[in-house]
Amino acid sequence: MHTKRTRNKPTSSLLLVLLFLALLAGTGAEAAGFRLIYANDNLGELDGCG
Amino acid sequence: MNDPNQPALVVTGGNLLFPTDQQTPDATETAKITADGVLQATQKMHATFAGIGSHDLAAGIAFLQQSHKPPAFSWLSLNLLDPTTRRPLFTPALQRQVGGVKIAILALSDHTSFQKGSSDFQVADWRISLPEALVQLKKEADCIVLLSNYSLSENMEIARAHETIDLIFQTGHSVGNMTPVVINKTLITQTEIRGKYLGVLDIDWNGRGAWSEAAPSPQGKKKELPASTYANRFIAIKQSLVSDPEIDALIKQTQRRMDKLRHGQTP
């Protein structure tokens, strides 16, 4: 029993490392989203005031 | 993409204040009141900077300097220079952090619009001003945005010469709403002039390099991300849009000031 458990430990650790690496890789591939709101000349309504 | 809660930045490219490069003496005071209202409205819409286009100088440098109050509001131009020191008269470039992306914003005024010259300022050719500035900004920022008062042909030349510029927002030229085009590694776009439209550009930033237009992914399949993607749309500014009470009050206040001026009173 005891010997069996010791043998499993490296496998579990390896799986954990693989999972961690996969998560890190996933984070790296994720793009950052943002929005740019833009206009040309002024922003509209007051243009008609003059 | 198209998440209404995603981080956003208001980008005002230039030619914000006046409709032409030159004002007649009679029109100047009226135009200044309108310009003041436009600027206040722009700031209420959370704009904290604007590029300097040739029209913005119609009432002189001093008028523009009155509203240049960093960090609340900054006028930007890399190549509008003090004729004595040859240093920029306003903020040449600034940085904003938007959704984890460090964005450098710089602006160019069109030097070809100022052939007559002025004792107050000089406008340098972008070929002189841009290279050195980009070397520094490339180190400091993830994404470089240029607000350009130059024409499309000139902006295409800028994009071909400087692939570190990721986006160019073009202002002051009447080519209508321009579907974004990719030149080299730069996305160039502009809305119709005179504030008739707002442009909304949603970006999934995946680092400097190639651009591709966002397309819906096949269901259940994660999209590959070799490039930054974008989705652009133009929103027409119509009278039927629900107005903002603060902006309405501002318009009325501006109209009252102009009426006073017309009747010979102090606005």
Image (spheres, coloured by chain):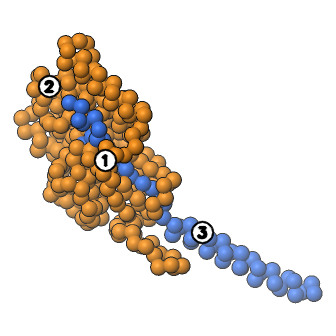
* Residue B149 visible from this viewpoint: no
* Residue B7 visible from this viewpoint: yes
Chain at tag 2: B
Name the disc covering residue B27, or none.
2
The 10 Å Cα crowd at callout 3, few under 14, some 14 to 19, many 20 or more, is few
Chain at tag 1: B
Q: Which chain is blue?
A: A
What percent of the width, then of the height, locates residue B43?
38, 35
For the residues marked 1 and 2, what is the alpha-carbon distance in whole angstroms? Answer: 26 Å
Name the disc covering residue B245, or none.
none
Going 41% across and 60% down the picture, which residue do you hit? B203
**Which amino acid lies under the numbered mark 1 shown in the image of this protein?**
Ile
Q: Colour of chain B?
A: orange
Question: Helix, strand or loop at disc 2?
Answer: helix
What percent of the width, then of the height, locates residue A19?
67, 75
Task: Give the residue pinned by disc 1.
Answer: B237
Going 25% across and 29% down the picture, which residue do you hit? B34
**Which amino acid lies under the numbered mark 3 shown in the image of this protein?**
Leu
Check the image and name the residue furthest to the left: B116
Front label number (3 vs 1): 1
